[in-house]
């Protein structure tokens, strides 16, 4: 039985009220949901909330709102899980960081899930992690500002495509679904975004010397 | 854009089936290649960019331009995932058994994992089990690496290396089973020597387990691991030889030399087998009640290191013993020699060679400052020992012992009261070099 056939069978069982099938579907996609949470979590929450906590809460939401998914068949179940998980993340962030002065880079928008500023911040946060030698630690501070500015100059969909394809490990089709564009457009934008990121990184002295 | 070569050369792996023919046709061919390349990166196949460029000459330019960025993005992803998993090392593990081992109590934990004392239910022997705290299901490429490393390390056989019996994976965690050593780390000994009375008794080393804070070893297990000698000595508290109980004091130079000799012999053996330790420090050198040194955690630092050097270096304790060239990204056998030298430095002086408020400060010191001379901190250190330590901890690897064997040679010489020679060029030699260019002043070493 292929992946998609198996998934369709599980969804049929969910329609018939089988919660075990829903749990199985959720755990099938769990790794990539974990990746998304890990990528997008505000660093201020490190140590307070971990990705597993978020997924636990998201699961409860999934169980509560499964009917919404079933009544609107326009998305794949993974994309829907991802949406629920994204909303759970927003709630958790508000709960922990709510009254604090908002870091403009981490504004979230419910509709898109994440604003382009937050993706930009996440990308630069994680890309700079690759400067692994402590002697480069000092360089990080300097490059951090430059990188953020450079990424901000990129088109927001380009940025988002890179985040989805790499940090969340989504396929071309899933990326297309989430961004609301065609498979072809998604494919083209990915390649263009890669080229642009290369340009951005080349402009930063010392960044690509590895 | 129909290029027959492209159509037939596609070999798609791991694509979810819902993306059928139609979807492939909508996508740019080079994007499909990029996806395949990334998939190969993720499954640890180490694809070559040049290879792709040659196989698909039509897209070669784009491949050479953008595939390195793919690698960069994947590396960044992997490192951030590693960091996240490390941050979430559980306080307690949700299991009491791993394979045929029943976990008894926690012996200690560090950045690399948690060590438990355990009973192997098949042999009823007491063993030690180290658990790496990351669930490999999240980062599957690690499991492969862990297994390779564990396999290599398990082959090491030396009287001063803690043998690894087997390794496995359960509940998503990787673990390995090794011999339980009834001893304590040099870090504990150094701390004790620093205290006012500065003495460590041999039977205290044997009884160290009973002072572990949580999860006690049952007295049944205790008696199973003590040697008959040890039991006799411990029970003979009021024996007339009490005054001559074996012990380590701040000036137990000959014992310290023995410790150094054993540790260096272990390194010689491992280096000979192509295994570097990469994390030599006092906590990884155990001393048992019989005075035997056991080095633990061989080779396994490599597995995690390359994935997240930043996080591991954040553990200041390790950073302090790290050779300067490692901080710039290269390392070889001489880096282990350096770390061992630093460990000895602390054993002899009871002080770390470098102190710093934070990572950056520490790194700067390691790279730029010379450590104090041991005899400045502890004047009674024998000169030969000081020379050996200094030869091991020179910042420039070219001026250091070229191998553990070289260091061992000097230790044995010192042990026989023979003169040990400094590897640094003498002041005179250096002076001649600077004024005479290449003429004169060879590497004639001076003795100090």
Image (cartoon, coloured by chain):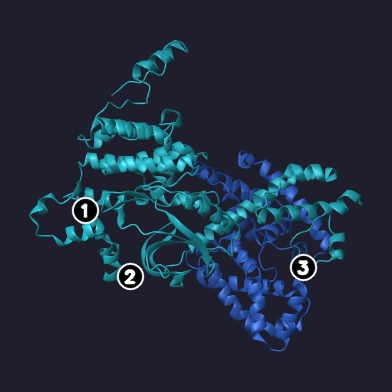
Residue B202, label in figure: 1
Q: Is residue B304 visible?
A: yes
Q: In the visual, does A46 lie left or right of B287?
A: right
**Circle nearer the N terminus (2, 1):** 1
Which one is in front in this view, the residue at disc 2 or the one at disc 1? 1
Which residue is farthest left? B240
Chain B shade in the render: cyan
The verdict on a common chain for dots 2 and 1 is yes
Mark 3, Cα crowd under 10 Å, few <14 / some 14-19 / many 20+, is some
Q: Is residue B308 visible?
A: no
Chain A shade in the render: blue
Which residue is farthest bottom? A16
Report which residue position mark 2 lands on. Answer: B215
Question: Mark 1 falls on what kind of element?
Answer: helix
- Residue at 68%, 83% in the rendered image: A66
Mark 1, Cα crowd under 10 Å, few <14 / some 14-19 / many 20+, is many
Residue B391 drawn at (x, y percent)? 36, 31
Q: In the visual, does B174 lie left or right of A34?
A: left
Report which residue position mark 3 lands on. Answer: A177
Chain on which label 3 sits: A
Residue B123 drawn at (x, y percent)? 40, 67
Proximity of marks 2 and 1: CB atoms separated by less than 8 Å: no
Placement of the N terminus of chain A among the 4 image quadrants: bottom right
Most foreground residue, A52 or B175? B175
Chain on which label 1 sits: B
């Amino acid at each position: 039985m292929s992946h998609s056939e198996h998934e369709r069978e599980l969804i049929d069982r969910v329609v018939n009220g089988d919660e075990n099938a829903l749990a199985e579907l959720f755990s099938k996609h769990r790794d990539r949901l974990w990746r998304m949470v890990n990528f997008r979590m505000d660093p201020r929450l490190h140590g307070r909330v971990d990705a597993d906590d978020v997924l636990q809460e998201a699961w409860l939401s999934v169980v509560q709102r499964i009917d919404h998914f079933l009544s609107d068949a326009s998305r794949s179940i993974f994309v829907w899980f991802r949406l629920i998980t994204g909303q759970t993340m927003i709630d958790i962030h508000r709960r922990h960081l709510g009254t604090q002065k908002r870091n403009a880079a981490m504004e979230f928008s419910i509709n898109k899930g994440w604003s382009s500023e937050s993706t930009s911040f996440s990308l630069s946060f994680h890309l700079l992690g690759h400067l692994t030698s402590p002697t480069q630690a000092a360089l990080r501070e300097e490059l951090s500002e430059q990188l953020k500015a450079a990424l901000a100059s990129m088109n927001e969909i380009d940025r988002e495509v890179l985040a989805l394809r790499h940090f969340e490990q989504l396929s071309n089709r899933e990326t297309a679904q989430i961004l609301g564009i065609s498979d072809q457009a998604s494919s083209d934008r990915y390649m263009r975004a890669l080229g642009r990121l290369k340009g951005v990184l080349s402009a930063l002295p010392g960044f690509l010397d590895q | 854009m129909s290029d027959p070569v492209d159509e037939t050369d596609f070999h798609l792996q791991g694509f979810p089936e819902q993306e059928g023919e139609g979807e492939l046709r909508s996508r740019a061919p080079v994007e499909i290649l990029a996806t395949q390349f990334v998939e190969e990166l993720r499954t640890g196949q180490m694809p070559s960019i040049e290879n792709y460029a040659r196989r698909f000459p039509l897209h070669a330019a784009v491949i050479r331009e953008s595939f390195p960025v793919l690698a960069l993005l994947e590396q960044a992803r992997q490192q951030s995932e590693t960091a996240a998993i490390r941050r979430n090392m559980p306080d307690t593990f949700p299991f009491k058994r791993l394979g045929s081992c029943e976990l008894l109590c926690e012996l200690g934990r560090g950045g690399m994992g948690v060590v438990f004392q355990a009973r192997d239910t098949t042999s009823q022997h007491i063993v030690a089990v180290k658990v790496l705290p990351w669930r490999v299901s999240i980062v599957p490429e690690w499991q492969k690496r862990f297994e390779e490393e564990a396999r290599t390390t398990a082959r090491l056989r030396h009287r001063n290396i803690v043998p690894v019996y087997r390794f496995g994976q359960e509940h998503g965690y990787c673990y390995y089973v090794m011999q339980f050593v009834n001893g304590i780390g040099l870090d504990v000994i150094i701390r004790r020597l620093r205290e006012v009375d500065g003495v460590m008794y041999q039977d205290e080393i044997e009884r160290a387990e009973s002072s572990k804070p949580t999860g006690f070893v049952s007295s049944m297990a205790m008696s199973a691991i003590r040697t008959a000698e040890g039991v006799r000595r411990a029970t003979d508290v009021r024996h007339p030889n009490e005054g001559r109980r074996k012990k380590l004091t701040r000036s137990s130079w000959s014992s310290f030399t023995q410790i150094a000799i054993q540790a260096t012999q272990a390194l010689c053996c491992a280096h000979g087998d192509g295994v570097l330790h990469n994390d030599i420090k006092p906590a990884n050198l155990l001393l048992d009640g019989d005075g035997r040194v056991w080095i633990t955690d061989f080779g396994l630092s490599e597995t995690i290191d390359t994935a997240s050097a930043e996080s591991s270096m954040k553990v200041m304790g390790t950073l302090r013993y790290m050779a300067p060239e490692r901080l710039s990204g290269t390392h070889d056998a001489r880096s282990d020699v350096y770390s061992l030298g630093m460990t000895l430095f602390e054993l002899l002086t009871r002080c770390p060679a470098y102190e710093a408020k934070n990572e950056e400060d520490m790194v700067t010191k390691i790279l730029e400052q010379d450590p104090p001379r041991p005899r400045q901190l502890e004047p009674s250190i024998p000169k030969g020992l000081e020379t050996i330590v200094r030869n091991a901890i020179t910042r420039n690897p070219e001026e250091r012992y070229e191998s553990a064997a070289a260091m061992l040679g000097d230790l044995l010489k010192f042990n026989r009261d023979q003169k040990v020679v400094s590897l640094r060029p003498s002041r005179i030699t250096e002076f001649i070099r600077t004024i005479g260019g290449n003429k004169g002043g060879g590497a004639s070493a001076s003795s100090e």
